[in-house]
Image (cartoon, rainbow, N blue to C red):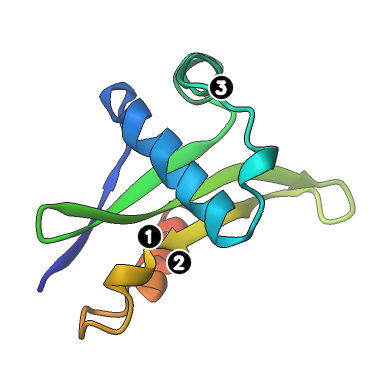
Amino acid sequence: MEFRIVPAFEQDLPLILRLIKDLAEYEKLGHAVVATEAILRESLFVKRVAEVVIGYAGDEPAGFAVFFQTFSTFLGVPGMYLEDIFVEPRFRRLGLVAADRALYDAVAGEA
C-alpha cells in the first residue's frame, strides 16, 4: 500500500479535528481537547500560526503532523517545531514506507 503526504487545506478541517481527537484518545487525553473546527480554521488558515500535513495510506487518511516556525535568539536563525505527529494504530506495521518517518521527512523538507 502506498503512503503519500499532502498539505492540509481548509476543507480538511473535519479530518484534522478527528485526527487530533484520535491522537488525544491514544494518549489518554481525550478530555483535554477543546479545539473546534472554527478555532482550527482561525489558527491554521487565517492567522497561519501552524501548518498541517496529512498522510494517506492509499485513499484513507492515516496520520498527520502539525508544525510551526520558531526563532532562536541565541543563534539568530529560524527553526521548526514539530508539535504533533501521529499515525493511526491500524496503519502501523503494514509494510508501508515507514509512515512516521515519511511524516518526519515531510516536515524536515518544509524546514
Residue 99 image offset from top left, x and y in percent? 32, 72
- Is mark 2 in CB contact (under 8 Å) with mark 3? no
- 111 vs 87, left or right, is right
Tell me the residue at 59%/28% (across/down).
49
Q: Nearer the viewer, residue 20 or 40?
A: 20
Disc with the residue nearer the chain's start (3 vs 1): 3
Q: Where does label 3 land, which residue?
A: 43
Residue 36 image offset from top left, x and y in percent? 52, 22
Is the residue 67 above or below the residue 34 in the image? below
Q: Nearer the viewer, residue 78 or 104?
A: 104
Label 1, residues with CA under 10 Å away: few <14, some 14-19, many ≥20: some
- 44 vs 64, left or right, is right
Q: Three-letter amino acid code at disc 1? A: Ala
- 106 vs 91, left or right, is right
Quarter occupied by residue 27: bottom right
**CA gap, disc 2 and disc 3:** 22 Å
Q: Which mark is residue 104?
A: 2
Q: Three-letter amino acid code at disc 2? A: Tyr
Tell me the residue at 59%/55% (across/down).
82
Is the residue 111 above or below the residue 40 in the image? below
Q: Secondary structure at mark 2?
A: helix
Tell me the residue at 66%/51% (across/down).
29
Quarter occupied by residue 68: top right
Q: Where does label 1 land, which residue?
A: 106
Residue 72 image offset from top left, x and y in percent? 80, 50
Q: Nearer the viewer, mark 3 or mark 1?
A: 3
Q: Three-letter amino acid code at disc 3? A: Ser
**CA gap, disc 1 and disc 2:** 5 Å
- Is mark 1 in CB contact (under 8 Å) with mark 2? yes
